[in-house]
C-alpha cells in the first residue's frame, strides 16, 4: 500500500471513530453512575433522524444538532424513568429503546419525507462544513495537513470530550460523586447526597452525547438520514467502553482501534498477509471478539462499576 | 438481686434536670414501628458530653433501629431529639451530619476502589473542584491521623486495607465532618483482638478531646472496659441506664436477657448412643476473607440434642452453613465415621442430605423456602431428586408429591392444609412447619436446626419443640442453634456457648443458669456452675 | 411484594400493557395523518382474513414460538439471553449443512437430522457465553449480544466463501434438494379434511414448535431439571442451600435456550427459504424477548403471544402494501410492549394493586 492509501485509511479512521467516541463517552457517564445502557444505539439513531429532519426543515445545522440532542434526551428520560424511578430492568429498557428508535425513525421519516425512510439529501448550511479549520487557518491543501485539520468541527469536539471527561471524572466534585454512586450508592446516600439526582444527571449527559453522535452521523459523516444509519455503532461503542474498562483515555484508544478496523474492512475485502489471508468478516467481528476476551478476563479483567445494573434501594 | 444501684427506665428524664448543655444527645419518648413490629418503644436516654456511652442488648432489642433514627435513616413515629440541649429534627442523613453526628455502620459505606482521601471528602467537598478539597483534607487527615493514632495512609485504596483500617477510615470520615458525636454499631464484630484494642485506644482519645462516643455492642467486656455509662435495651425498650463503674457484668447480663419464662418441654432424660458427628478445627471465612469460624470442635451422639447458644453473628451461622454444605470450610467433619468434603464440587447440599444430614436453615424465607413456589414444590426442595418423587427416569411425580405434602401438612397441622398455596401465603409459623416437616420426616441421622421458632407463634413453637424432642427420642442427633436462651435451655441435653467464632465452653442445662450463659455469650468466661 | 390475584397478574397486566402499547401506536398512526381504525382493519383482514393470510401469520408465529420459548427458559433461571438472533443464525447453518451435506432419502429423516443439527448449533453458540458467565463471571447479556455480531460475521464468511455456489453473486447457499422440503401446513390439514391454503410458507414446523412448547412445559414443571432451574431463578442462595449447582444450571439453561433459538431455522431455512440466506432470522430472536415477556414466561402464554406477534408482523406487511403506513409501526408497537411489560411493569402493577386493595376493602 502506498502513502496516499495509508493516509486515506487514517483519514476515514478518524471520521469513523468520532461517532463511536461520542457514544462510548456517553455510555461511560451512565455506566459509571451505575446505570447500564444498551440503548446507546437507539439514542444515536433517533438523534441522527431528528437532527437531519430539523436541519432540513430549518436549513440550520445547529438547530439540527439541538433537535438531535432533544430527541436523544427524551429517550434517555424514558431509560431514567424505567431504571431509576421505577426500578425496572435496565437491560430490557435498553432493548426497548433500541426498537423504539428503529421503528419510530422509519415511520416518521417515511410519512414526513416520502423517501422510504430517509431524509432528503442535506446541502449547504444543513450539513456540517467538511473542513472548517482549513479555510479558517488558511492552511495549504496537502494530505497530511488535511488529515489533521481537515475534519468537521464535531470531530474536534469529540476529541476534546476525552480530556474534558477525564477532568470531570477525576478532578471535580461531580465526577467523584458520579464514580462513587456507580460503585457504592450507599456510601453516597449516607454522605447525604442524592443517589437519584446523580443518576439522572448522568443519564442526561449520556443523552446529550448520544445526540451529538447521532447528529454527526447524519449531518457530517453522511448527508442526511438513512434507515438504520447507525448500523450497530451503538453496540460497538458499548464494546469499546468495556474494552476501555470504563476509562476515558482508553475509550479514545478503543474507539480509534475499532474505527481503524472499520476503515480497513470498508477499503479491503480481505487482507493478504502473504502467508495467510484475513477475511474481511473477521476484521468486522474483531471488536466483538476482543470484547468477549476482555470480559472473560483472559487478558486483563474488565470489572464493571460494582453497583451497575441495580436500582438503589435503601436497606432496612 | 441487682448488686448495683440501677437507674430505672426514666433515668434519662430525671437527668434532664441537669444543665441542658451538659448532654450531647437526649432522646425523649422515641418510638418506631415497622408494620406490626414495635422496634422502639418510648425510649429516653441522655448522653453526657465527652463520655463513652454503651448501649447493650440482645439481637432485635432495637439498638440499631434507634441509632438509624438518630442518623436520619428512619423517621421516628413519635419523640424528640435534642442535640446539645436544642431540639433538632433529623429527617435525613444530611441533617444528622449538620448536627454533628457521625456514624460508623456495621457494614462500612466505603467506595472500594477509591483512596482513603477520596472516601473522606465524598459528600463533604469544599467546592465544585476537587483540588482544594483534597489539599485541605490531606493536611487535616494527617493531623487527625497523628492526633488519634489512626495510622491510615491518605492515598491507600480501600480495597487494599485491612478491615480494621477500613473502620478507621469511617471514623476519619466522621471526624472530617467535624462530628462531635460518634456512633459505632457493633464495631468489633469484624476486628481482630489487636485491632479492637487499637479501636478502644482511639475512642479513648476522642473522649479525651471532648467528643462523645456511643458504642453499640453485645459484648460485656467492651462495655465494662471502655464505657462511662451504659444503657440496656430489651425488646424495644430502654430498661436501664447506669454508670458502668457502679454495675457488674452479671447485673448487665441479667438486665439484657431478662427473666424469661422457661418454656415447659416434656422430655425424658437423654440416652445418648454412638457418636454420629464429630467436628474438629472447623474454620470458615466470609466473602471478605475474614475468618468467622475460628477452629471449632465438638461431637454429637445419637439420641441427644446439642444446643449452641450465642448472640447472632458469633459464628453459629457459619457453623450451620459448613455442616450443611453451603459454605466452604477447612478442618474436619466426620459423619457416621466418614469424612465429608468441606470444599469443591462434593461439598453441597445434595451430598450432605445423602450422608443423612437434614438442615432447617436459620433464615427460612431466604434459604429454606422458595417463597413463590407452592407448598408441595417446597416439600421437594432439596429432595427433588428423591426416588419416591419420580415417576420414572424423566418425570417427577407431582401427584405423589402433592399427596405426600397433604400428609405432612396433616401430621404437622399446617394451616391452611392446602398444598397448592404459595409459601408466601402462609404465616411464619406455618412456613416453618413446612420446612421442619420436610426435614424431620426424612428421618435424618442428624438434624441441623437454626432458630427453629424465630417469628413463630406460641402454638407452633410448642409443636416444633415436641417434634425435635421426638426425633431425639427416636435415637437421632440434633444440633440446635438459637439466640433464644430459654429455647436452648429447655431443649438441649448439652449446651455449647459460642463467642467470636469460638466455643467458650460447655454447660449442662440442669446445672447452669441464664446469667452464667449470658456472661459467656458476652465473652466473659463464666464461673463454673 | 406483588399482592395482585393470580388472574390479574397473568392476564390483566399484560393486557393493559398491550392496550397501552396499541394506544400509543394508534396515536402515532393518527399523528402521521392516517386512520388507526382503518389500519387495524387492514391488518386484521390481511393477516387473518383467509387461510392464505393465516398461513403467513402462523409461519411468523412459528419463528416467535421458538425464540420466545428460548428467551423464557433463560428468564426462568433469571438469565437474560439476548443472543437469540445469533443462536438462530447458527441454527440456520446447522440446518443448511445437514440438508446439503447428507443425501437424505426422505424429508422425515431430514427433518429429524435438521432438528438435531439446529438445536446443537444453537446450543453450542449459547454455551460459550454461558460458560464464560458461570466460570469467568462475564456478563451474559453483553457476551450474548457480542455473539450476535460474531455470528453475523461468521455467517457472512461462510456463505460468501464456502456455501455460495460457483458463479453466484448472491451471498446464499445452494438450494436444498427437493427431497428435504417440508410439507406445508395446508397439505397436512388437507389430510384431515380441513381446507387450508398451501400457497404460504406455513409448514410442519408449526407442529414442532407446538410440541416444543409442550416439551418446555413438561420440562419446567415435571422434571427435576426444570424444578432446579426455576428454583435457581427464584433464589440463587436458596438453590445453593438445596444443593443445586449454579454453574450447572447456568450451562443447562443457556444450552436449552440456544437450542430452541436454533430450531427456529427449521421453519425459516428448511421450511420456507429452502436455502441459507444471509439474514434468515430477520429479528425474530429479538421479538422472542417481547413474546416471552408478553406471554408471562409460560409456554401457553408464549404460544398465544407468538400468534399475536405473527398477526402483527404479517399485518404490518399488509399495512405497507395497502396504505402508506410503513410496517415499522409494528416495531414501535413491539418496543412499547417490551418497555411496558419488561422495564416498566411497576407502572402498571402498582396502580392496579392499589385499585384491587381499594376494591377488596369495599
Image (cartoon, coloured by chain):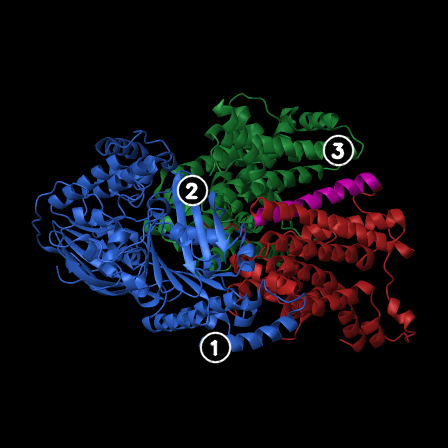
Chain colours: A red, B blue, C green
Q: Quadrant of residue A86?
A: top right
Give the SS element for disc 1: helix
Going 38% across and 49% down the picture, which residue do you hit? B62
Give the SS element for disc 3: helix
* Left or right of residue B50, residue A155 in this image: right
Q: Nearer the viewer, mark 2 or mark 3?
A: 2
The x, y position of residue B276, in whole percent, is 14, 55
Going 60% across and 51% down the picture, which residue do you hit? A196
Residue marked by disc 2: B33
Q: Is residue A109 magenta?
A: yes
The x, y position of residue A20, in whole percent, is 70, 61
Residue nearest the observer in this picture, A290 or A190: A190
Q: Is residue B329 visible?
A: no
Going 54% across and 38% down the picture, which residue do you hit? C65
Screen quadrant of the N terminus of chain A: bottom right
Give the SS element for disc 2: strand
Q: With respect to residue B178, does B74 lie above or below? A: above
Q: Residues within 10 Å of mark 2 (few under 14, many from 20)?
A: some
Q: Quadrant of residue B126?
A: bottom right
The x, y position of residue A68, in whole percent, is 78, 51
Calculate the distance from the C-alpha at mark 2 to the C-alpha at mark 1.
Answer: 41 Å
Discs 2, 3: same chain: no
Q: Is residue B337 magenta?
A: no
Q: Main secondary structure of the magenta part?
A: helix
Region in magenta: A90-112
Residue marked by disc 3: C29
Residue marked by disc 1: B147
Amino acid at each position: 500500500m502506498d502513502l496516499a492509501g495509508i493516509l486515506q485509511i487514517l483519514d476515514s479512521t478518524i471520521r469513523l471513530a468520532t461517532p463511536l467516541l461520542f457514544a462510548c463517552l456517553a455510555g461511560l457517564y451512565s455506566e459509571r453512575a451505575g446505570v447500564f445502557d444498551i440503548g446507546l444505539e437507539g439514542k444515536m439513531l433517533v438523534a441522527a433522524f431528528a437532527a437531519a429532519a430539523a436541519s432540513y426543515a430549518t436549513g440550520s445545522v445547529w438547530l439540527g444538532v439541538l433537535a438531535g440532542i432533544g430527541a436523544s434526551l427524551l429517550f434517555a428520560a424514558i431509560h431514567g424513568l424505567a431504571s431509576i424511578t421505577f426500578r425496572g430492568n435496565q437491560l430490557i429498557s435498553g432493548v426497548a429503546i433500541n426498537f423504539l428508535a428503529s421503528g419510530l425513525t422509519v415511520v416518521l421519516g417515511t410519512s414526513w419525507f416520502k423517501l422510504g425512510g430517509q431524509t432528503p439529501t442535506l446541502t449547504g448550511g444543513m450539513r456540517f462544513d467538511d473542513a472548517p479549520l482549513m479555510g479558517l487557518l488558511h492552511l495549504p491543501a496537502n494530505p497530511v495537513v488535511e488529515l489533521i485539520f481537515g475534519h468537521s468541527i464535531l470531530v474536534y469536539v469529540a476529541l476534546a470530550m476525552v480530556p474534558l471527561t477525564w477532568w470531570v471524572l477525576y478532578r471535580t466534585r461531580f465526577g467523584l460523586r458520579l464514580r462513587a454512586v456507580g460503585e457504592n450508592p450507599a456510601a453516597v446516600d449516607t454522605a447525604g447526597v442524592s443517589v437519584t439526582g446523580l443518576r439522572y444527571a448522568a443519564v442526561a449527559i449520556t443523552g446529550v452525547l448520544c445526540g451529538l453522535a447521532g447528529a454527526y452521523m447524519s449531518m457530517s459523516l453522511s448527508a442526511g438520514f438513512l434507515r438504520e444509519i447507525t448500523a450497530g455503532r451503538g453496540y460497538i461503542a458499548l464494546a469499546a467502553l468495556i474494552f476501555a474498562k470504563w476509562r476515558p483515555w482508553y475509550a479514545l484508544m478503543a474507539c480509534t482501534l475499532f474505527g481503524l478496523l472499520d476503515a480497513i474492512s470498508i477499503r479491503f475485502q480481505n487482507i493478504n498477509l502473504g502467508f495467510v489471508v484475513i477475511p474481511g468478516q473477521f476484521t468486522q467481528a474483531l471488536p466483538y471478539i476482543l470484547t468477549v476476551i476482555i470480559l472473560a478476563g483472559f487478558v486483563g479483567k474488565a470489572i464493571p462499576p460494582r453497583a451497575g445494573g441495580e436500582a438503589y434501594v435503601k436497606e432496612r | 438481686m441487682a448488686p448495683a444501684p440501677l437507674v430505672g427506665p426514666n433515668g434519662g428524664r430525671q437527668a434532664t434536670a441537669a444543665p441542658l448543655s451538659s448532654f450531647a444527645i437526649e432522646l425523649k419518648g422515641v418510638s418506631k414501628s415497622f408494620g406490626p413490629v414495635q422496634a422502639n418503644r418510648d425510649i429516653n436516654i441522655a448522653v453526657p458530653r465527652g463520655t463513652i456511652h454503651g448501649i447493650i442488648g440482645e439481637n432485635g432489642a432495637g439498638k440499631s433501629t434507634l441509632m438509624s433514627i438518630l442518623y436520619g435513616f428512619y423517621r421516628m413515629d413519635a419523640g424528640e431529639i435534642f442535640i446539645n440541649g436544642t431540639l433538632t429534627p433529623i429527617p435525613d442523613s444530611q441533617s444528622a451530619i449538620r448536627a454533628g453526628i457521625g456514624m460508623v455502620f456495621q457494614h462500612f459505606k466505603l467506595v472500594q476502589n477509591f483512596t482513603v482521601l477520596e472516601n473522606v471528602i465524598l459528600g463533604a467537598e469544599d467546592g465544585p473542584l476537587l483540588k482544594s478539597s483534597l489539599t485541605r483534607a490531606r493536611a487535616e487527615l494527617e493531623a487527625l491521623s497523628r492526633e488519634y493514632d489512626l495510622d491510615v495512609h491518605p492515598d491507600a485504596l480501600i480495597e487494599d486495607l485491612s478491615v480494621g483500617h477500613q473502620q478507621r477510615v469511617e471514623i476519619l470520615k466522621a471526624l472530617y465532618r467535624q462530628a462531635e458525636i460518634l456512633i459505632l454499631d457493633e464495631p468489633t464484630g469484624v476486628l481482630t483482638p489487636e485491632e479492637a484494642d487499637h479501636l478502644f485506644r482511639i475512642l479513648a482519645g476522642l473522649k479525651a478531646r471532648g467528643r462523645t462516643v456511643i458504642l453499640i455492642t453485645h459484648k460485656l467486656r467492651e462495655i465494662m472496659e471502655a464505657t462511662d455509662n451504659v444503657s440496656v435495651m430489651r425488646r424495644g425498650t430502654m430498661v436501664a441506664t447506669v454508670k458502668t463503674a457502679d454495675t457488674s457484668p452479671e447485673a448487665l447480663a441479667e438486665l439484657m436477657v431478662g427473666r424469661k419464662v422457661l418454656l415447659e418441654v416434656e422430655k425424658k432424660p437423654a440416652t445418648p448412643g454412638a457418636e454420629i458427628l464429630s467436628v474438629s478445627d472447623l474454620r470458615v471465612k466470609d466473602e471478605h476473607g475474614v475468618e468467622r469460624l475460628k477452629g471449632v470442635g465438638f461431637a454429637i451422639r445419637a439420641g441427644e440434642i446439642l444446643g449452641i447458644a450465642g448472640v447472632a453473628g458469633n459464628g453459629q451461622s457459619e457453623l450451620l452453613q459448613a455442616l450443611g454444605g453451603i459454605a466452604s470450610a477447612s478442618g474436619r467433619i466426620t459423619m457416621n465415621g466418614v469424612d465429608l468434603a468441606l470444599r469443591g464440587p462434593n461439598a453441597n447440599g445434595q451430598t450432605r442430605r445423602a450422608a443423612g444430614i437434614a438442615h432447617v436453615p436459620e433464615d427460612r424465607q431466604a434459604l429454606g423456602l422458595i417463597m413463590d413456589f407452592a407448598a408441595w414444590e417446597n416439600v421437594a426442595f432439596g429432595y427433588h431428586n428423591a426416588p419416591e418423587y419420580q415417576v420414572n427416569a424423566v418425570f417427577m411425580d407431582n401427584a405423589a408429591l402433592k399427596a405426600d405434602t397433604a400428609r405432612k401438612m396433616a401430621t404437622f397441622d399446617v394451616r391452611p392444609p392446602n398444598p397448592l398455596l404459595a409459601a408466601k401465603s402462609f404465616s411464619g409459623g406455618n412456613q416453618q412447619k413446612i420446612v421442619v416437616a420436610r426435614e424431620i420426616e426424612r428421618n435424618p441421622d442428624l438434624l441441623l436446626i437454626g432458630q427453629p421458632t424465630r417469628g413463630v407463634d406460641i402454638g407452633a413453637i410448642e409443636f416444633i419443640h415436641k417434634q425435635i424432642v421426638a426425633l431425639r427420642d427416636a435415637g437421632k442427633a440434633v444440633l440446635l442453634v438459637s439466640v433464644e436462651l430459654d429455647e436452648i435451655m429447655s431443649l438441649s441435653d448439652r449446651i455449647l456457648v459460642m463467642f467470636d467464632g469460638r466455643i467458650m465452653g460447655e454447660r449442662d442445662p440442669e446445672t447452669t443458669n441464664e446469667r452464667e450463659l449470658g456472661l459467656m455469650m458476652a465473652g466473659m468466661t463464666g464461673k463454673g456452675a | 411484594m406483588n399482592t395482585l390475584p393470580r388472574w390479574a397478574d397473568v392476564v390483566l397486566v399484560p393486557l393493559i400493557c398491550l392496550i397501552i402499547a396499541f394506544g400509543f401506536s394508534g396515536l402515532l398512526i393518527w399523528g402521521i395523518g392516517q386512520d388507526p381504525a382503518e389500519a387495524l382493519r387492514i391488518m386484521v383482514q390481511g393477516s387473518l382474513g383467509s387461510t392464505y393470510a393465516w398461513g403467513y401469520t402462523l409461519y411468523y408465529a412459528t419463528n416467535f414460538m421458538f425464540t420466545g420459548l428460548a428467551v423464557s427458559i433463560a428468564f426462568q433461571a433469571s438469565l437474560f439471553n439476548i443472543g437469540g438472533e445469533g443462536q438462530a443464525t447458527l441454527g440456520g447453518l446447522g440446518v443448511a449443512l445437514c440438508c446439503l451435506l447428507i443425501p437424505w432419502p426422505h424429508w422425515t429423516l431430514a427433518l429429524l437430522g435438521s432438528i438435531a443439527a439446529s438445536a446443537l448449533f444453537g446450543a453450542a453458540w449459547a454455551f460459550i457465553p454461558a460458560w464464560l458467565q458461570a466460570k469467568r463471571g462475564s456478563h451474559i447479556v453483553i457476551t450474548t449480544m457480542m455473539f450476535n455480531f460474531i455470528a453475523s460475521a461468521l455467517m457472512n464468511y461462510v456463505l460468501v466463501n464456502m456455501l455460495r455456489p460457483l458463479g453466484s453473486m448472491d451471498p446464499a447457499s445452494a438450494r436444498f434438494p427437493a427431497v428435504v422440503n417440508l410439507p406445508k401446513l395446508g397439505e397436512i390439514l388437507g389430510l384431515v379434511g380441513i381446507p387450508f391454503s398451501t400457497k404460504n410458507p406455513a409448514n410442519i414446523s408449526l407442529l414442532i414448535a407446538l410440541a416444543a412448547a409442550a416439551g418446555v412445559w413438561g420440562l419446567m414443571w415435571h422434571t427435576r431439571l426444570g424444578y432446579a432451574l426455576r428454583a435457581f431463578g427464584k433464589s440463587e442462595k436458596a438453590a445453593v442451600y438445596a444443593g443445586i449447582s449454579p454453574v450447572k444450571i447456568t450451562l443447562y439453561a443457556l444450552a436449552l435456550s440456544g437450542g430452541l433459538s436454533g430450531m427456529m431455522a427449521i421453519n425459516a431455512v428448511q421450511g420456507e427459504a429452502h436455502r441459507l440466506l444471509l439474514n434468515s432470522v430477520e429479528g425474530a430472536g429479538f421479538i422472542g424477548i417481547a413474546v416471552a415477556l408478553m406471554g408471562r414466561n409460560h409456554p401457553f402464554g408464549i404460544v398465544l403471544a407468538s400468534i399475536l406477534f405473527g398477526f402483527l408482523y404479517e399485518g404490518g406487511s399488509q399495512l405497507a402494501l395497502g396504505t402508506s403506513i410503513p410496517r415499522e409501526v409494528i416495531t414501535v408497537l413491539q418496543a412499547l410492549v417490551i418497555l411496558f411489560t419488561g422495564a416498566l411493569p411497576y407502572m402498571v402493577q402498582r396502580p392496579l394493586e392499589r385499585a384491587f386493595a381499594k376494591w377488596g376493602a369495599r
